[in-house]
Structures are given as C-alpha cells and as structure tokens.
Image (tube, helix red, strand yellow):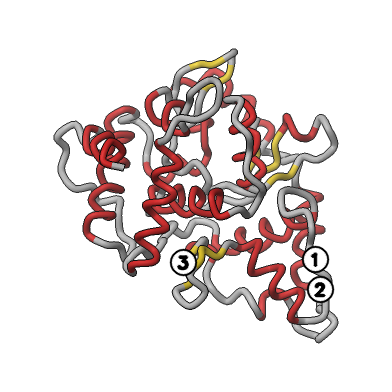
Amino acid sequence: MRKIVVTLATLTLLSGTSAWVTASQDPKVKKEIAEYQDYFKKRFPTVAKDDYSDGVNALPQYAERRANWEMLMEFPPYDADMDKAREMWKKPLKSGKTLGSCLTRPATKYPYYDEQRKEIRTVELDINECLKKHGEEPIKNVKHGKMALLIAAFREQYNGQPWDIDIDTPGAIAAYEAGKKFYWTKRGQLNFSCANCHVHSAGNKLRGDVLSAGIGHTTGFPVYRTKWSLAGKPWGTVHRRYGGCNRQVRAKPFKAQSPEYRALEFYEAAISTGVPLKVPSQRQ
C-alpha cells in the first residue's frame, strides 16, 4: 500500500491543489484525487474536464478518428434500445411502484458505502433489491442485457451533473483504499495494472487502438460497445468491462458484483470526482 501512495504522490508533478475536486471527502483522499486529476491536466492540457466524459474520443491522439465518431453520434446506434430502456424503467412493478421509487439516490452518488450493511452498494444491487422487494424476480445477468439498459435509463436522468462520491466515513475510506490497491496492483501473466494502461500509457497506441485516460473512465457506463455488438450483445456494465480487462492481461476475472470489482468501481468513481455523467455512450 505504501508503494501505491508513493506512486500517487509522484503524479502531482509538484502541482497545487486541483479545483476539480469538490465532493465530501476525507482530506487525504481529496488530496490524492487532486493529484491524480492534476496529472491528466498536465498530460493533456487541451482536454477540458467535462470532455473526459467522452472517453478516448476526447484525447488528441484520437483526433484522426473523432470525425467518424461524431458522424456516428448524429444517429447513435443505441437510440432504439434507449427507447425500450426508458419504458422498462417507468413500467410499474407488481406492487404498482416503479424502480424510481426505490432508487432515490442520485446517480452521481453511486456507488456508495453503506455503513449499516458494511458494503459498497452499486446501482445493480439496488435495482435487484427493489425488484425483489416489490414481488419481481431479480435480474441474474448483471453484466449486460436488461440490467445494463435499466442502469442507462436511470443514469441518463443525471447527465451533465458531476460525479460526487462521498468518502468521509471510516468504512468509505477503507473501501476507497481497497479499490485503490486493486487499481495500482499488477496482475496476470502480462503483469499489468489498471494504471499501466490508463495512467502511464493513456493516449498511447496499443494494437492500433488508443488507450483511454483513467479520469472519467467510467462516467459513460453502461456503454454500447462496437466490439460487443458483433456478438449481438452490445450493452455492458462496467463490471463486464473489468472482466474483459482482466482476461486481456491473462488474469482470472472476478465475478460481476464481487467485492473486488465493487471496490474498483468505487475508486474509479472517486478519482473522477467532478467529471459529468454522459449516458448512454458509445465505445469501440
């Protein structure tokens, strides 16, 4: 853990406190997030904070492809699916209530640490809890399909609002630390960490693709991904992407909604404090 903290500290490049960090956070956590974000402000000085919601499309190294992406966004491939998603979100449950009656917490506050349950809660967990509470069957596949569409319908209601994760209790701080450890720890036969690709190599090309930046990395999830659409399942939650990343570095993936992936999601949301949500999003 000490090595992780040292690594974070080196990202500051002797910079001051970033104005990007605004959430209710422990002073030490807030300082680390500021240092992380300042690194990207210096690495990509032409990229505005809000633009990181567009993922790799925001980076100057992706400029040659951005025009194609912008044309695609004139008639997004996910429009028809989103019409269905909004209807599913508003559809009354057996009790007569809707999912919105349960999920009253803003999407900008997910995931969050529940002090009573002593665990990180995600949108997926709260949707399934709501379904069960109102006489419906929980959704088994929490990586794509119906679950991804419901989350997209929920989160798009908060588009343009900055992520604002609270990390000011002992449990939340411990959850943040667990996610940080996962993010910076190397794993798999290739011995890669999340940071190897999305911090140190952000903007670099890998097999013809450009690696996205860690800041704002998950603000567009669930996403409609071109690669996934080839197999007929274009939608995916962030935990689906985590599993794919682990397999790419030849590490055994954890199950979706595992404590490990929830901690990672919590940390990634925290380090993107202040970056606005933009759902749905299209990714390669």
Marker disc for residue 223:
none
Q: Given the image, on which type of amino acid does mark 1 rest?
A: Met
Residue 197 on image: x %, y %: 47, 27
Tell me, yes or no, whether the two marked residues, 3 and 2, touch with CB atoms within 8 Å. Answer: no
Report which residue position mark 1 lands on.
88
The quadrant in which the C terminus is found is: top right
Q: Write the residue at 65% across / 34% down.
A: 244
Tell me, yes or no, whether the two marked residues, 2 and 1, touch with CB atoms within 8 Å. Answer: yes
Q: Residues within 10 Å of mark 2 (few under 14, many from 20)?
A: some
Q: Residues within 10 Å of mark 3 (few under 14, many from 20)?
A: many
Report which residue position mark 2 lands on.
91
Marker disc for residue 113:
3
Q: Is residue 108 visible?
A: yes
Q: Given the image, on which type of amino acid does mark 3 rest?
A: Tyr
Q: Given the image, on which type of amino acid does mark 2 rest?
A: Lys
Mark-to-mark CA distance, 2 and 1? 5 Å
Residue 208 on image: x %, y %: 59, 14
Q: Write the residue at 40% across / 36% down.
A: 184
Q: Quadrant of residue 49?
A: top left
Q: Quadrant of residue 225?
A: top right
Determine whether the residue tagged by mark 2 lies in a helix, strand or loop: loop
Residue 212 on image: x %, y %: 49, 30
- Whichever of labels 3 and 2 marks the residue nearer the N terminus, that label is 2
Q: Write the residue at 55% across / 21% down.
A: 189
Q: Name the foreground residue: 242 vs 68.
A: 242
Q: Is residue 27 left or right of residue 139?
A: left
Q: Quadrant of residue 163?
A: bottom left
Determine whether the residue tagged by mark 1 lies in a helix, strand or loop: helix
Residue 224 on image: x %, y %: 70, 41
- Whichever of labels 3 and 1 marks the residue nearer the N terminus, that label is 1
Mark-to-mark CA distance, 3 and 2? 28 Å
Mark-to-mark CA distance, 3 and 1? 27 Å
